Amino acid sequence: MGCRTIMSQQLILRKTDVTAASLLFTALSNDCRVGILNLLRNGPKNVGEISEALKIEQTMASHNLKCLAFCGLVTSKRLGKTIEYTLNRETVEPILRLADKHISKYAINLRTCKTLER
């Protein structure tokens, strides 16, 4: 049996995909939205539960959930008169884990950064 070399494949994004990736990172660059994603890691929640847990107005929670849903980061399901939001675990959980790993290993200074604050 011969040795098989696997070459790493470099992903080159098309211009439209560069724009889409930039928009995805823009959606993830908001404390409120990342807070919502982190909260939904514990299970589905409605707008009232999210706004109460994060101590934000329901309109702010709704606006940010709309953005997260548009980006495919959360899904929504109507349950009677309420809408329940669920994390897209397939892709978001690995993104959040990778972000934590990256920060812990290469960018621990981000935890106390004043330069990049808005």
Image: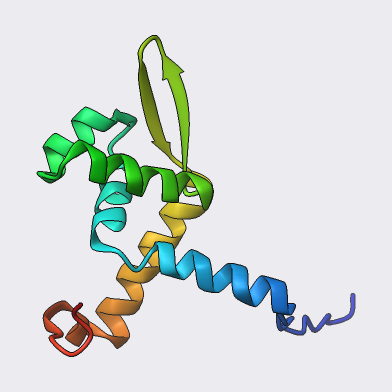
Residue 62 shown left or right of residue 92 in the figure: left
For the N terminus, give its image quadrant. Answer: bottom right
Where is residue 77? Give x, y as percent: 47, 24
> Which of the pair 105/6 is nearer the observer?
105
Q: Quadrant of residue 55?
A: top left
Q: Total of numbered circles in the picture?
A: 0
Q: Residue at x 70, y 72 (%)?
A: 16
| 113 vs 30, nearest the viewer | 30
Q: Who's the residue at 12% across and 35% down the image?
A: 52
Image-based side of 92 in relation to 110, left or right = right
| Above or below: residue 29 compared with residue 65 | below
The quadrant the C terminus occupies is: bottom left
Above or below 9: residue 31 = above
Question: Which residue occupies the extreme bottom position in the image?
Answer: 115
Q: Position of residue 42 (x, y in %)?
A: 28, 38
Residue 86 rendering spot, x and y as whole percentages: 41, 35
Q: Nearer the viewer, residue 13 or 107?
A: 13
* Left or right side of 39 for 71: right
Residue extending furthest toward the front: 59
What coloring was used for the rendering?
A: rainbow
- Give residue 56's quadrant in the image: top left
Q: Quadrant of residue 43?
A: top left
Q: Residue furthest right?
A: 1
What's the residue at 45%, 58% (across, down)? Answer: 94
Relative side of 111 to 102, left or right: left
Residue positioned 71% across, 83% down in the render: 10
Q: Nearer the viewer, residue 65 or 110?
A: 65
x%, y% of residue 100? 30, 69
